[in-house]
């Protein structure tokens, strides 16, 4: 997993390959020649423990 910081919009983009063509998904800038950085940061998966509708409240909007 690699990431590159776009020199144009300053936003990070991630890729699992890190090789070949690398286009910024935000501004479509060509980042192929930019240095790639190791993306060691593991993004936590969102927990699905929250059950929607459990505390559903009906509003009587007359
Ligand atoms: Zn960009």
Image (spheres, grey):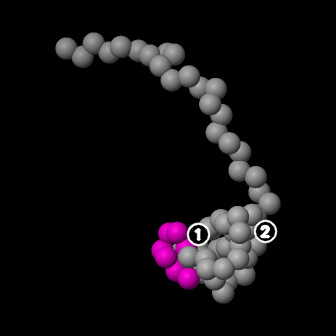
Q: Going 70% across and 64% down the picture, which residue do you hit?
A: 16
Mark 2 vs mark 1: in front? 2
Quarter of the picture containing the C terminus is top left
Q: Is mark 1 within 8 Å of ligand 1?
A: yes
Determine the image quadrant of residue 14: bottom right
Indicate which disc, 2 or 1, sits on the residue closer to the N terminus: 1
> Would you say residue 20 sits in the magenta stretch?
no
Q: Is residue 16 above or below residue 35?
A: above
Q: Report which residue position mark 1 lands on.
A: 11
How would you rate the neighbour count of disc 2 (Cα within 10 Å): few for under 14, some for 14-19, many for 20 or more?
A: few
Q: Going 76% across and 72% down the picture, which residue do you hit?
A: 37
Q: Going 67% across and 66% down the picture, which residue do you hit?
A: 15
Quarter of the picture containing the N terminus is bottom right
- Residue 17 location, x and y as percent? 71, 69
Q: Main secondary structure of the magenta part?
A: loop
- Residue 34 location, x and y as percent? 67, 83
Please give left or right for residue 24 compared with residue 42 in the image. left
- Residue 43 location, x and y as percent? 71, 50
Badge number at residue 38: 2
Determine contact: label 2, label 1, CB under 8 Å: no
Q: In terms of secondary structure, where does tag 2 sit?
A: strand
Magenta segment range? 24-30
Which of 34/10 is in front?
34
Q: Going 65% across and 34% down the picture, which residue do you hit?
A: 47
């Amino acid at each position: 997993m690699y990431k590159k910081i776009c020199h144009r919009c300053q936003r990070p983009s991630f890729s699992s390959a890190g090789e070949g063509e690398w286009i910024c998904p935000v501004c479509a800038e060509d980042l192929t020649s930019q240095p790639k950085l190791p993306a060691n940061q593991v993004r936590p998966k969102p927990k699905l423990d929250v059950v929607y509708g459990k505390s559903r409240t009906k509003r009587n909007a007359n």
